[in-house]
Image (cartoon, helix red, strand yellow):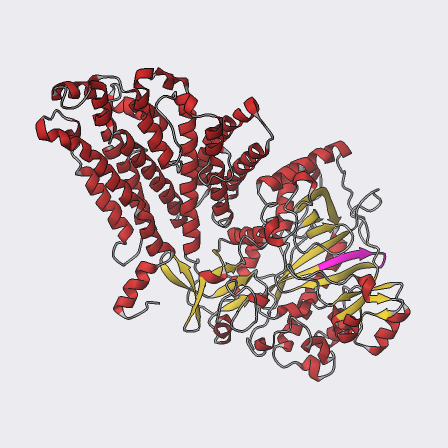
Amino acid sequence: MPAARPSTSLPHPAQLRALRSRLRARIRDASLTDLSPADTHGHPKTGLGGETPFWELEPTPLVIDVAEWSLLEAGLRQRARLVNAFLVDLYAGQQVLKQGILPPEVILADPYYRRPCLGLEPQRQCPATLLRFDLVKTTAGWQVASTWANTPIGLSYAVQNRRFMTQEAVDLYRNLPDYQSIINFPLQLLDALHALSPLDDRAPSIVVLSAGPHDPFYSEHSFLARKMGLPLARGDDLLVLDNHVYFKTIAGLERVDVIYRRLNDTHIDPVVFSTDRETAGIPGLLQCIRTGNVVLANATGTGVAESRALDAYLPQLMRFYLGEKPLLPSVPTFTCGDTDQLDFILDRRDELHLRPIHAPRLGASRPTPSRDLLSMEGLAQVVRENPYGFVAQPHLETAPLVPGARKTPPFRLSAFVLSSRKHYAVLPGGLVWLGAGEPPMDRVGATADALVFAAADTASGEVADYEPTMASGVQANTLGSRSAEHLFWLGRYLERAEATARMLAILDDVALEEIPARERRRWLPVWRGLLEATGHGNERITARERPKATLGGDLAWRMTLEAENPSSIRSSIHWAADNARQLRDHVSPEAWTVLSRLATRLDQLHRTPARGELRAALPPQAVAAVLADVNAFLSTAERTMLHDAGWHFLRLGVHLERAIMTCSALRHVLGTHDEAASAKTGSAEAAPADAIDAQLVYRDNPELSALLRMLGSQDAYRRLYQTRSQPRFVAELFLQQSEAPRSLAYNLHHIRLSLQAIRAGATEEEDPTACAANDLLKLLRGVRLDRYFGAMRGDEAADRQALSEVLADLLNQLYGLHPLLSDHYFSHQARLTAVTAQGEFPL
């Protein structure tokens, strides 16, 4: 007699509403709802304005007791064994066709049968590394509704549903009996990937292959890559040379041994398969697989196991491959290609509906509604032309999520099985899809957690017969060239947004009102320099305006929230978030949450309908949000991200942008200081040189105070020099003071340190970027500030103007560091040129 089902005490409806709200906030903060833009796939984005959410989490879990799960687990393992045995036979001896178990039309006419894969991997035991089975519960018990073997989705969402629920529904989960853990199942997947490696002498190099951020399930790809500690690559990040696959990293080409693909095999190798997305796959990959130099999980061609037509022959297939009866039956299925079954379909047309043998793929045209395929007039023409392409299944009445509960939606349970060298691990639980019909293809949809209670003699989260076979050693921590470039620009955009916000905050401060009207033009170089450094050099200002009045409503809006301005704060944060979105396997979830909240906040301010005084209040709110959250992101990233090469590329972007900002501001302020002094005294010739020098040294310089504040260095200046702002000391602070965080010397020193850390262990000679940084530091140390700010007479006074030329040269060289980084680390043009000159290609 089966054990009684454990009871769960569900929260009060009011508590459920609050819990739903917190769960929505969790998903939104993780930006797991904004990864498939509407303009890319033609479906609604998420959640705002009543649109269909990309992912919802219902706070009522599905509960499965020990006895019920024991039967399900045995049936799922049997199904996984069957799928792998079928795939091995299909792409090797094809005995299932030769002995008439399946009609040839069922396989050979299947659009996901890959003829080029015949005999591709004759020794492989488990082509389908990760399988997903969708189960429905009817009055007859559990049944398998569909099989997913190509690129099954949902594992990451099941794991994250559990994490969100245990964090938000603490009381509910604390009061439950012991249940099995699923959090570390991605690590079991990593073990299975290690076991696929053709190497025994070293740790294999493994990458996760994704279509990129435009894929609606990119969040899953990046989540699994991050959980397993593997690099996330796209097709054009990988290269085939001499029947080996190489990953383009900042250190050059690294050989790849195992690829966990999340890309449909239609696009996997554009040399072999016709595809409209040639850059998504890896040209020449199948030849590398055939020679045994790389292994793909899941194998190419596994999509044929998803055919619904196979369910019509399930008992025969079970007997043929396993000699067993099905422990988990499929939903009753009848194929239109069998004459006897077709007669049954036509006789029961009111009870059945026709479906294609494969669910539609993302981006494919919508299938013909089932009511138009089978009607009183008979079969539709499309069915008559391809009868083996359609099956009939009964209308199902599935059980509700909570038995006996009112207004509870029907559900499907997606269960995941991991196959590794004839060992099978079943995820204890899975992803619950709510609602009638099949799960959506372009979004996660409404989901719930699935809890499996633990047996008294079973440790939580452990699978008794699964034996991990991880290879010895640890995969080297590699950074792809594309990821390095995104990290670099992430740092630059964050620094640019923070600098613009700080400038606006200081300019709006009443301290700038200390500048008297007769000297108002003296602050203009500060303003112009910072406008140029933040990308607003085309803005026009005049000396007659007060500093605060200059930042009028239109200019403040353009610099903060205007979407069309590529240099506005909102645009900079948008580009920073876009780069971070491509780096979900590198940027920690904690840091990503901070950045996504900031981007959401700026979007909300941008959309706020406002005029007059209310509109004028929005830019200061944007400035305050950026000043708080950019620094919060960087500090959170420093605490939670691995301080590897990726971290140093992020810091490279920050320090380079900061150095450019400082140099641009100095070029306008210090380079024109003599002109401002001459305007005050009449001319350089009309006044004694020592009088001019005295004014330069001893008079108050409110424009220099403004510069110090806008560059966040006023406190550093006071501590170092303990005097009023003077040009000579300001120049020394920003050019040569190695301890001032905004100085050129400080930032170039840290650029050099980051480059040294990135190249740690490299044997080749120093790269051009490090040499250029060293040259800039030498140039800074060689600048004699006394010749520009000391007492000079006669022809020597002309040398004062040369400082602007020095600063302009420094600025040009700072801008030149990015092309050097790109040539050496991102595009490898410098290395390719050097290799071409030597006449060889190092592998």
Near-viewer residue (620 or 282): 620
What residue lies at 43% left-to-right and 41% top-to-bottom? 493
Above or below, 306 against 428 in this view is below
Above or below, 7 against 284 in this view is above
In the rendered image, residue 446, in percent from the top left (x then y), is placed at 71, 47
Tell whether 10 sits left or right of 222: right
Near-viewer residue (755 or 641): 755
Above or below, 443 against 85 in this view is above
In the rendered image, residue 700, in percent from the top left (x then y), is placed at 26, 17
Which quadrant of the figure has residue 1?
A: bottom right
Above or below, 412 against 29 in this view is below
Q: Can you name the residue that lies furthest to the left here?
A: 794
User: What secondary structure is the magenta-colored segment mainly?
Assistant: strand
In the rendered image, residue 622, in percent from the top left (x then y), is placed at 50, 30
Which quadrant of the figure has residue 835?
A: bottom left
Q: Which residues are magenta?
A: 134-140
Residue 135 is covered by the magenta coloring: yes
Q: Can you name the residue that lies furthest to the bottom here?
A: 98
Which quadrant of the figure has residue 341?
A: bottom right
Let me know if residue 400 appears in the view.
Answer: yes
Q: In the rendered picture of this protein, how many numbered marks are placed on residues? A: 0
Tell whether 757 sits left or right of 240: left
